[in-house]
Amino acid sequence: MSDVAEEIKIRIEQLLRDRQGSEPQQMKSEPYEKEKKVECQSCQDKGIRFDGIRNGAEYWSDCECKAIRRIKRLMKSSQLSDEFLSKSFENYRNWAGDERLDELWKTARKYAFDFENMRKLEEGNSIGFAGEVGIGKTHLGCAVANELMKQGVQVVYFNFVNGFKEMFSQYDNGGLQVQKIRETLQKCEVLFIDDIGKGRVNPQIGVPDITRGVHDEMYGLIEHRYFNRLPIIWTSEYELELITMLGEATASRLMEMSGKNLVKVFYEEGETVGELNYRLRHHFVGV
């Protein structure tokens, strides 16, 4: 790795550790504008550097700060909270020592670090984490997203419950804002949908009810990304039950897009509910 590439890697990793994406609070306006602080001494914040004159011609090159600023913009626009931006493969903990959680981690990491090849696949350009509460589905989804952004890939985070609530609340302000949200979700480079199907279970059908509005929006969203081969990172506490909730057309496309990258961890017969839940670890092993 070149010195420049190593410097970019180090500074990006530092961003992930330092509550990435946050901007310093603006100071109140003053009668006289203070001199703007230069962040990069190498290029004076221009993004390019003068490399000298050879054979009578000027030579310029991109400064490494240009890549770092792009990563900061990606992090800020991703909709990931500071807490989620701190999630990584290194700080994921398989506290239960379960081999299935190791497989979850390995699949996520392989997908993230081989993304340029994964995204070209006709089947398997996406990744899904289906399974029990507290096994680290969201953590690993965030770890994938953070690694992709370090590679310069745009990722947008969308929580299935709160995201649609926010989206539908914009109808009172006219359809333009709703369409803007819809197009962002459809067209972003990588979409991270967290907690698909989350909600109160309807005892009559055994799964949460999905409203007609959410059902239709999910169909349009998944269909667009499916036919345009745009990757999705997704998590859910359900697998085949998604067919009942979302409809077979939507769920089957989502699963086909994930292919072998759909990893599932559900309790088997004889296992105690909660024993894989990281948030309940003190109740099982006292750690």
Image: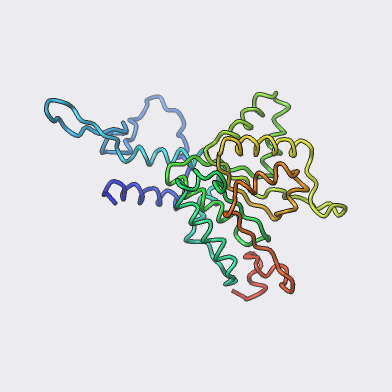
Q: Nearer the viewer, residue 141 or 81?
A: 141
How did the renderer colour the structure?
rainbow
Q: Nearer the viewer, residue 261 or 49?
A: 261
Q: Position of residue 196 (x, y in %)?
A: 68, 48
Q: Position of residue 153 (x, y in %)?
A: 46, 41
Q: Is residue 3 left or right of residue 30?
A: left
In the displayed orientation, state which residue is furthest to the left.
Answer: 55
The part of the image, by quadrant, that contains residue 31 is: top left
The part of the image, by quadrant, that contains residue 159 is: top right
* Residue occupying the point 56% across, 52% down: 141
In the displayed orientation, state which residue is furthest to the front.
Answer: 122
* Residue occupying the point 86% across, 55% down: 203
Q: Position of residue 1 (x, y in %)?
A: 29, 52
The part of the image, by quadrant, that contains residue 226 is: top right
Q: Position of residue 95 (x, y in %)?
A: 57, 70
Q: Is residue 35 left or right of residue 202?
A: left
Q: Give the mark count.
A: 0
Q: Is residue 170 left or right of residue 287?
A: right
* Residue occupying the point 63% across, 76% down: 285
Q: Is residue 180 left or right of residue 89?
A: right
* Residue occupying the point 69% across, 24% down: 175
User: Quadrant location of the C terminus?
Assistant: bottom right
Q: Nearer the viewer, residue 144 or 72?
A: 144
